[in-house]
Amino acid sequence: MSTFIDNLSNNMLLLPVSMGRIQLEVKTKKGADAIKSALGVAEGVRAGGTIGALGAMTDLAAELINRPYGHARTYTYTHTLAAAVRGHRIVTTTRTPEHLTRYAEFRHAMTNGINEFMPQYEAYYASTNGIADMGSSQITIPHPDAVREKAYINVGVPQQIRPADLDGMNLPAGLAADIAARTDAHIMQQAEAAKTAAVEELSKAVDNIEKQLTSGKRLHDSLISNAQNASRNLREFTDSFDNDPRLIEACDIVDDRIASSTLEQVKNSETLRSQAVRAASTASKSLKRVASAPAVSDEVGTIITGDSLLADLID
């Protein structure tokens, strides 16, 4: 077994995560026509005109239901790693309890929001017969059942990342070897895709730091925290996969020279600002070199392309 795959299977898990939210806006013909008229848009040119999809209940739905969804989505993309398998994220075993706890909190918040919102919406829907009066216009609002099924946060059982274990199975040796090699190759492709995504996230964060601290007028609180989270994700993945020293060095630069200071400290100190800009530039260049270099990986097995039952079906 590849050392890298062994590292992955011992330190990483696939976490099934899916979530949905309520659509808050719908396009209306009257709205589109009004915009076209006001802007002098020619016929045949697309123009939008949206209105609250749940009538007078739209703002409450945004607060009680879509807000927990937004928190869960933000957490997913800032604290877990991309996976090649749709609807899954890669997480380290050490942080899995933390992730499950946070998702339970998000799910609890959404459930409470749904339980508070739905009785009010059901009464509103019944009182309007599903037709909301929006002043001089009316819209058909969705049935409560349709609204309820749109909002959810689901987390499945964490799954192991495992190579094929075919020992003791009644398979021809050549086919067993081919299955094992293809399984290993698939795992490596998933791992490299996750690594690429993590590198891109940190690269984007440090590029934004360099840009904002050089010419930005309004500095958001997330400027430093985004880089801190991206560095942590990349470091944890690298430690659990290939221990690429180039990436560890880039994370060290971010952690030591950028994330070690608060945004307020950076804003009020020309020394710290200059240090952060230089560090961001250095880290960015290093990450771009890694991104353009060949993948660092062991040989994971030879895939049979000649006399192979799988080759005839897959290749």
Image: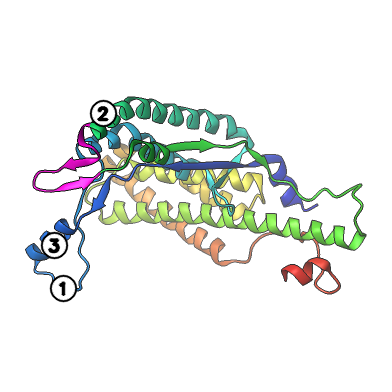
Dot 1 corresponds to which residue?
Answer: 43
Left or right of 224 in this view: 291: right
* Mark 2 residue type: Ala
Splitting the image into 4 quarters, where does residue 63 fall?
top left
State which mark lies toward you, 2 or 1. Answer: 2
User: Real-space Cα distance between discs 3 and 1?
Assistant: 10 Å
For marks 3 and 1, the one nearer the N-term is: 3
Would residue 305 be counted in the magenta stretch? no
Asked if the residues shown at circle 2 and circle 1 are in contact, with their CB atoms under 8 angstroms apart, the answer is no
Q: What number is the disc on residue 123? A: 2
Residue 28 point in image, percent of width and height: 20, 55
Residue 195 point in image, percent of width and height: 58, 54
Left or right of 261 in this view: 18: right
User: Real-space Cα distance between discs 2 and 1?
Assistant: 41 Å
Dot 3 corresponds to which residue?
Answer: 33
33 or 92: nearer the eye?
A: 33
For marks 2 and 1, the one nearer the N-term is: 1
Residue at x 45%, y 30% (from the top left corner): 107
Q: Say whether residue 84 is visible.
A: yes
Residue at x 34%, y 36% (from the top left corner): 144
- Considering the numbered disc 2 on the image, is that residue within a helix, a strand or a loop? helix
* Mark 3 residue type: Asp
Q: Which residues are magenta?
A: 127-140
State which mark lies toward you, 2 or 3. Answer: 2
Tell me: residue 177, above or below residue 102: below
